[in-house]
Amino acid sequence: MRSVKAVLRRLVARGEAFLKGAAFDCRACGQCILPRTGLICPMSCPKGLRNGPCGGTIGGMCEVYPDKECVWVRIHRRTGGTIGEVPVLNPSPDSALFFTSSYANRFTGLDRPGTTPLRYLDLPADQFEGPAATRSRLEAALRSGRFVKTCEVRSPRNADLGRLAREIEHIRGHFDAVNATAYLNGKPSLPAARTCAELLRFGVEPVCQLTCRDQTKTSFVSELIANDANGIHNVLCLTGDSYAGNPRIKQVFDMDSSLMVYEARHLRETGVIHFTGEAVKAPPRPFIGVAINPFSTPPEMPIRRLMQKAAAGADFVQTQLVFNLPAFEAFMRRYCDAGLHRRLFLLAGVPVVISKSAMEMIPRVPGVDYPPEVRRRLEGAADLRAEGCRLARETIDAVSRMPGVRGVHLMLFGADHSVLPDVAAGF
Ligand code: SF4
């Protein structure tokens, strides 16, 4: 028979969930951080992100539910987030406390691990001073001061690696590093690490993309260890786009992308896995990347998110696709004003649009700012391939003159990687 105490606990939890559900859209995580988020529940974000927005928000709206305002835009507005100070880093909640009473957990102290902000590591204010911290060739290229170029290959959806090999043949020797995508749109594919191994086989420096949508803390740290063993020294920590409405798939979100960065950097700096407290002999030392959407609004929001990611331990950042140059330039001014140009190596995301069917997907890419005049230019082009390459070269030329931009990351809308070396040549 259930004890009276257990019944009482359940009653209190249900009462709290009912009342806070009505007042704050509470999702009953049992570890309340409402006072820190302007009384707006961060767990009502469809991705349950407790540290800021994902890159999918645009025009203030949510990526998953485009008819709803982004929860983090509301929090940002309510808390009056300015560029003055680094936002706190909330830990991920303990799932064992879900559907229990946060008041009871506060009283007993059970909620402390899930509510006490993490202590940022003591990292240098200027990342660019001193020797390289990792064995990454991408880091060495960025530290050399020259303008760096990267691009990406899509991890194949089957074990036929012929197409991948042909793509790599086209781009090898022309780029400082190449990203391997991770389960795009949540669909099964070759794991990014396996694609990275293929890049390495061709002598190409790989960047392994990992998403907190698909990784637990355990699997993430294990991936870092496996990458280290396989000679893969760059990781890009992403939230992951939504599963395109497929509700039958479990999305993990054991961490958000800032917490992924913190885990990776904590391990690199201290040799200790943060979430287990265990020491690791010869820990992995990845060069750590993040993504940012410069076009999300209010304009201070992506700057604050980047300040948090830099403080958590990020080394470099790749941006959302730049179609809107004036908005990107304004973002870069704020970026430099916040001192981020001394903390992070920034690569601007440059679209290379060469196929009509891929071009038609652009308005549906989460978080993309696609101005009508650029859309008209591409859609009206007699030769889309030539026009898309011309636009990409103009974009590279423009961003390369902006203070704080250390390179470009080319993203191909089409299937022919042979265009990329020409687009990037001369910069
Ligand atoms: S943070 Fe947790 S306890 Fe607080 S309102 Fe949100 S779901 Fe409820």
Image (cartoon, rainbow, N blue to C red):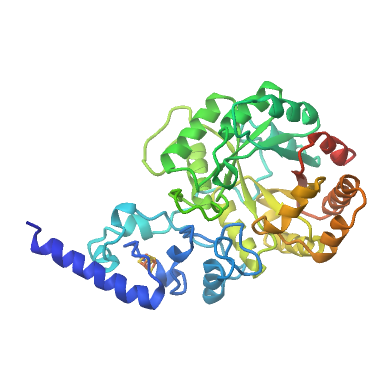
The residue drawn where x is 50% and y is 59% is: 51
Q: Quadrant of residue 158?
A: top right
Q: Position of residue 336 (x, y in %)?
A: 72, 59
What residue is drawn where x is 77% and y is 34%? 175
Q: Residue at x 37, y 36 (%)?
A: 278
Q: Relative to the observer, which residue lies in front, 157 or 274?
A: 157
* Residue 273 visible from this viewpoint: no
Q: Is residue 128 left or right of residue 89?
A: right
Q: With 120 as the anchor, is 136 left or right in this view?
A: right
Nearest the camera: 128 or 219? 219
Q: Is residue 323 left or right of residue 126?
A: right
Q: Residue at x 75, y 48 (%)?
A: 358
Where is residue 261 drawn, in percent x and y?
Answer: 53, 46
When the figure is inspected, residue 139 is found, relative to residue 393, above or below; the finding is: above
Residue at the outermost right position: 382
Query: With respect to residue 340, does 165 lie above or below?
Result: above
Q: Residue furthest left?
A: 1
Figure quadrant of the C terminus? top right
Q: Position of residue 337 (x, y in %)?
A: 71, 63
Q: In which of the image's four quarters is ligand 1 placed?
A: bottom left
Using the rendered view, name the quadrant where residue 141 is placed.
Answer: top right
Q: Quick one: which residue is furthest to the front in this view?
A: 357
Which of the image's four quarters has the N terminus?
Answer: bottom left
